Amino acid sequence: MSPENYQQEWQVKQTIAESISPLIGQIYRQNGVEVLLFGKTLVNAATIDILKLHRVSRRYIGEELSPKKTLPIIEHLVDMPLSPCRIDVGQLAHQYWKEHNDAEGLSDFLQSALSDAIASDAEVQPKDVVLYGFGRIGRLLTRLLVEKSGSGYPLKLRAIVVRGGKDGDLEKRASLLRRDSVHGQFNGSIEIDTERKALIANGNYIQVIYANSPKEVDYTDYGIENALVVDNTGVWRDVDGLGQHLNCPGVDKVLLTAPGKGDIKNIVFGVNDGMIEAEDRIISAASCTTNAITPVLKAINDKYGVLSGHIETVHSYTNDQNLIDNFHKGERRGRSAAMNMVLTSTGAASAVAKALPELAGKLTGNAIRVPTPNVSMAVANLNLGEGTDKDSLNNYLRDMALKSELAAQIDFTESTEVVSSDIVGSRYPGVVDAQSTIAQDNRCVLYIWYDNEFGYSCQVVHCMEQMMGVRYKTLPGA
């Protein structure tokens, strides 16, 4: 291909991607259908992101998928009477075009492949959500819920609850949501309703409620009913503490974004979310580290068996550490987070057993807090029941990341240049670094990156959907 033709081909693809973007939005806003490309959402994706995702398809089907092949499928989706679901146009395009040379039979193919979502009488019933706490996770959950908002998406962020209420507080909350040093600018507009104490984010009216404890809030005063309260504070982690939310008028269920204590179910979505039952009123979404390592450990244990192991977490510093040396009730955590590697403990290894009981008592763990604001790494040193080698192990994990039921939880990179900042914004709870894999006989060492803020928040949203009974099917099925 001549140099001129490269540019010409790119411009053709760019023009097609530009036409795809508004169609994706139309399908989502009108029908509640989230369009994916090999598991990655196209909703609100920029033109360049759409093109990059088409190139990434090489990992899945061995060749780049042209936007010319997905556009006619998306155009058909616009005119189909679809009920809310998730549709992977990458899978559909691959299935159709490997057996057809033109679009003549495309309509019949889609009618058959998407029959479960066609002409359904199911109506979308809005479900109220309240975020109790508006720190790192609370603000990212807000971004995700606003991003997903539309007539077909049932989870409606109705309110956030924070302490304070001093002059200028509302403006500060809006500013923190609008600008983030790690995750960048909010994608849209944020307005402030000072009189009613509310934020309006991309048209979503979010009431700001000031309270120092759950017992001070009557959510029905704000028209909120049967709500899911997502507690991001970490102040209460047992049934008695979190049960305070259930005593508030207007609250139906509670989700904790930290490891739960006692009999609270700790859910790692994709691994043990089947444990969530309709009658469950308090659930924990476990920790960021537990969400990062458990899917990979399940994959390894299913094939090789895990006899024992140690998980070392290299974790970015968090808000509970001190910026400079000062008093802290925790050992070592009082030393400057921005200047030191701080050796500390983690319960993530033992917490894995709550999601994977077969690994109970087999894992130990420790953590090193390091001077980065986000993205962490878990190093899993495992003794296996069966022997393997690096290539075999990586090939298996690649397949798990691309084609298994854990594909939404495990990502996989073979880059020789990836560093922590490249993982910022990853929607996966864990990313296996294939170049660093070590395997010899019955031992292996796996390096798993994770965005301990955003990737974890995506898992929390999945749990929210499951708890409220609005987790939609992905088509076509496996």
Image (spheres, rainbow, N blue to C red):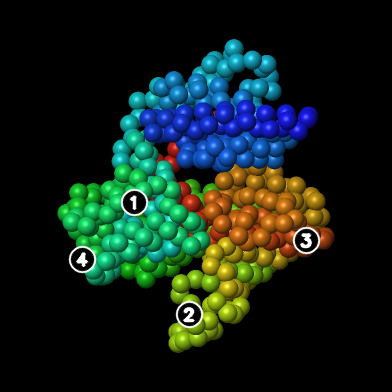
Question: Cα distance, mark 1 to mark 2?
Answer: 31 Å
Mark 2 lies on residue: 322
Say few, some or many: other residues with alpha carbon within 10 Å of mark 3 (under 14 / 14 to 19 / 20 or more).
Answer: some
User: Quadrant of the rendered structure where residue 308 is?
Assistant: bottom right
- Residue at 70 percent of width and 60 percent of height: 446
Q: Is residue 461 above or below residue 76?
A: below
Question: Cα distance, mark 1 to mark 3?
Answer: 47 Å
Q: From the top left corner, tell me how far across and down residue 268 is, in percent.
A: 51, 55
State the mark number for residue 438: 3
Q: Is residue 28 above or below residue 145?
A: above
Indicate the amino acid at tag 4.
Answer: Glu
Indicate the amino acid at tag 2.
Answer: Asn
Question: Cα distance, mark 3 to mark 2?
Answer: 35 Å
For this rendering, which residue is in front, 411 or 239?
Answer: 411
User: Quadrant of the rendered structure where residue 249 is?
Assistant: bottom left
Indicate the amino acid at tag 1.
Answer: Ile
